[in-house]
Amino acid sequence: MTTGYCPRRTSAFGAVLTLFAGGAFAAPPNTITVGQLALTLCNTDYTGYCGSISRPLDPAGVVPGSLSIGFEFYPRTDTTKPGLGTIVPQEGGPGYSSTGTRDFYLSLFDSLRNRRDVLIIDKRGTGLSNAINCPALQTGSTALSAVADCTKQLGRSSWFYGTAFAAGDIAAVLDALGIPEIDFYGDSYGTFVGQVVAGLYPTRLRSIILDSAYPVRAPDPWFATDWATAWASIDRTCGRSPSCNALPGSATARVQQLIADLRQQPIKGTAPDAYGDPAAVTLDVSALIRLIDSAGFGASIYRDLDAGARAWTDSGDPLPLLRLIAEQSTDFADDPVDFSYGLATMVTCVDYPLLYDLKAPDATRRLQYNQALASAQQHRPKLFAPFTVDEGLDSNVYITPLDSCLPWRAPPSTQTQGQPLPRSARFPAVPTLVLSGDIDSITSAEDAAETAAQFPNATHVVVPNLFHVVADSDYIGCTLSIVERFVKNLAAGDTSCTAGVRPVRTVPLFARASAELAPLTALSGNKAGAAQRRIAASALEAVGDVLARYWASFGTTGSGLRGGAFTYASSSTGYLFTLDGVRYTTDVAVSGKIKWNTSTGAVTANVTLARGGTSLGSLKMIWSDADINAIAAVQGTVQGQAVVASRIAP
């Protein structure tokens, strides 16, 4: 394979890049020529160029129409040496725009960009590539009427935005730019795209990285391993967290006690949502199933669930659980350019395994669906254990083959539902890296193992304690180094750094009052008594709770568990949080600043404490968030007494 290829550019462009490499601050040209295309400068932050090509809606020419495939091209920064190729990242969803994730991709491959170009292509129906806008679906609705409206709106094009067509568009863009082969990186549904590219266009790949993968040729339409991972990871995360592991019994047993309560009566109340706004929510069995299934997206659910269950069953406090539900249930309407629900539905119906045949009449589809459900109820009663199959189905949890495609238009004779690759397609022996988080319930490590087994030259790295899209959830840059090394050397190399990825630090106790908390451990120089160190513990938990909301929030604002508010903004080293009367317990209001250095993991908080408008003192807290079982050092004064103490970081 050729590894030193560089797309053809104008001599003027090469001269400008040489000036950049030499340290001069010449402005980049407004246009460049790459292959057959003239590209226009569209991103001055990263020196990126935009372009597009026209593609037929139906390459076979049966269905008329065309669409524009848009992309962004980020040239290598050093032209004094030969180029080493082109990296093509692909976003997931399905429905997300790949160009909308440019910041993450360019950061992920930053150390490689001096001699490698980065090409970000939006799949047809997303972002710059004629994003599908089905208005009823774009609200987030899953109603069958909304699906029916979408397929009616799209008409004969309903089957021409699938993954195979998107892979063909990628190959066409490469042809237009004169790029013979690429290093492909895909995350989530992007791994599905990568497999289709590999099966249809195997010679275009130098290497392929599949981050949080699931197989194109799924052995089980129920994806049962995802739910099994979600449930097992409740105990897995508890066992790795000292405060949770020290409790008697298991975390799943405590959650089962909650399930028993919910089967008797749902819990209703008001809690802050993902924007920090109060929302009326209901926690019932279905909501709990959906919550557990979503745990693999980030730390907040695994972090809070066990303690939230204990808060309810031990003291009747519903707020921690209701907040989790409110955060997961927050309504938001994305612009279809950012996320297209129409494209997501289309891919689900066209490419994913279903329990019914879309070539069949509507009545037959419904009959096939009902028969498949009855079979699961009879032969797979533990499909959603400890929940029943009926409870799993009633929840409409994402991993089930839902009825949402029942109204979808029948496929044309040229296409087979659920088969984006012909059965004859074989995967190439190109170097392949598959990355998984062992607590990812969205695409389980078992899913990824099935994906890796399809490729003759695959390395599968399972990273403990990480979630969906491991390169984006790694605290210490371990997977980043593996990805960089793989692109450079076509081998993962030493992956022992994965042992240093810290576990989720679960909440020890959701308490209504600071007196219920264990006091911080006194160190040399401490003058504060247990009561003052319990107040300090409440402040420490408030700080940790705010940091945890970063993973659950949609905006840059949030609410304390029991009152107060916070905002956050990016800084040159990470994020800066501003707290205004945030209350983890009802009797301690915390205000001040938190600095989180995402590169080093260092967390520094300088906060003041108050009760009923009266000052309680001030504290400084420091810990390294990247450390396994990190210890927070806390110093200051509470009620006039010097606090010098510590506790495992929140």
Image (cartoon, rainbow, N blue to C red):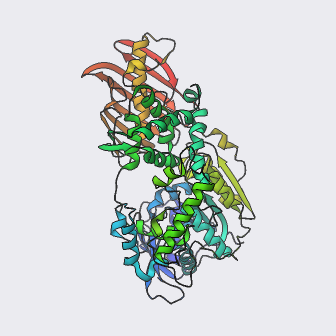
Is residue 188 shown left or right of residue 145? right
Spot occupied by residue 78 in the image (x, y as percentages of width and height):
57, 63
Q: Quadrant of residue 135?
A: bottom left
Q: Position of residue 105 (x, y in %)?
A: 52, 58
Residue 592 in the image: above or below residue 447 = above
Residue 114 in sight here: no
Q: Is residue 646 visible?
A: yes
Position of the N terminus by quadrant: bottom right
Q: Quadrant of residue 427?
A: bottom right
Residue drawn 40% across the image and 78% down it: 154
Horizontal relation, residue 473 to residue 635: left or right: right
Q: Residue at (54%, 62%) from the top-left corner?
A: 189
Rendering coords of residue 63 (x, y %):
47, 87
Q: Position of residue 114 (x, y in %)?
A: 57, 61
Query: How many discs mark residues in the rendered view?
Result: 0
Question: Can you say whether 247 is above or below 381 in the image?
Answer: above
Decide if residue 182 is on the left or right side of residue 68: right
Q: Nearer the viewer, residue 297 or 434?
A: 297
Choose between 240 and 627: the one closer to the eye. 240
